Image: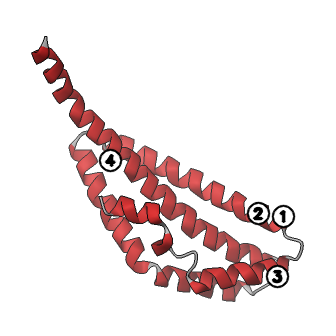
Amino acid sequence: MRALVVAAGLLLAPTIWAQALLDDYARVAALVSYMTTYVGETFIACAAAKALTEKNAEARFASYRERNAALLERADAWSREAERRLRAGGEGNAARLRSEDASLTAMAAASGHVQGELGQARDVPEFCRARIAAIESGRLDMSGNAELQQLLAK
């Protein structure tokens, strides 16, 4: 009986490991997508509200991406390695689907969050100035996201 329990545990161990990695892989995709979409959507919405020009919004978003380039590259490298390991374990298709779903869900949530914030703002130009200042100060940089940092350290 004990041998059967041990054998079952050994069979389940790779499945549990793969599921944990799959969850982390999808979460990294979601976090990166949410953060970049939130910042991009904020700039787009503020440009639409005439709080800044479209060209200025594009330049500010490029600056945000440049400031976060090292972490974006780190997340990309971590994701490639996780995907390689998942493919080797036969979970490549599941990884791709989970990652795409997590990213799309996160982008929709970030977009909705920005629209909700703008809809509740009494003074949209002031809201935009404050949010842009927060973005440019680095308060919304990816390096400040402890969950992402923890996942990438695995």
Residue 25 lies, with reference to residue 93, above or below; the image says: below
At label 3, the amino acid type is Glu
Q: In the rendered view, does 88 fall on the left or right side of 58?
A: left
Q: In the rendered view, does 123 fall on the left or right side of 2?
A: right
At label 4, the amino acid type is Leu
- Furthest toward the right, the residue is 122
Residue 117 lies, with reference to residue 98, above or below; the image says: below
Give coordinates of residue 89: x percent, y percent: 22, 41
At 45% across and 74% down in the image, what residue appears?
A: 143
Which quarter of the figure has residue 127?
bottom right
In terms of secondary structure, where does tag 4 sit? Answer: helix
Give the position of the C terminus as an image quadrant: bottom left
In terms of secondary structure, where does tag 2 sit? Answer: helix
Number of numbered markers: 4
> In terms of depth relative to the viewer, which is nearer, 43 or 2?
2
Q: According to the image, label 1 marks what residue?
A: 119
Q: According to the image, label 3 marks what residue?
A: 126
Mark 2 or 4, nearer chain start? 4
Q: According to the image, label 4 marks what residue?
A: 21
At label 1, the amino acid type is Gly
Mark 3 or 1, nearer chain start? 1
At 25% across and 53% down in the image, what residue appears?
A: 84
Mark 4 or 1, nearer chain start? 4
Q: According to the image, label 2 marks what residue?
A: 115
At label 2, the amino acid type is Gln
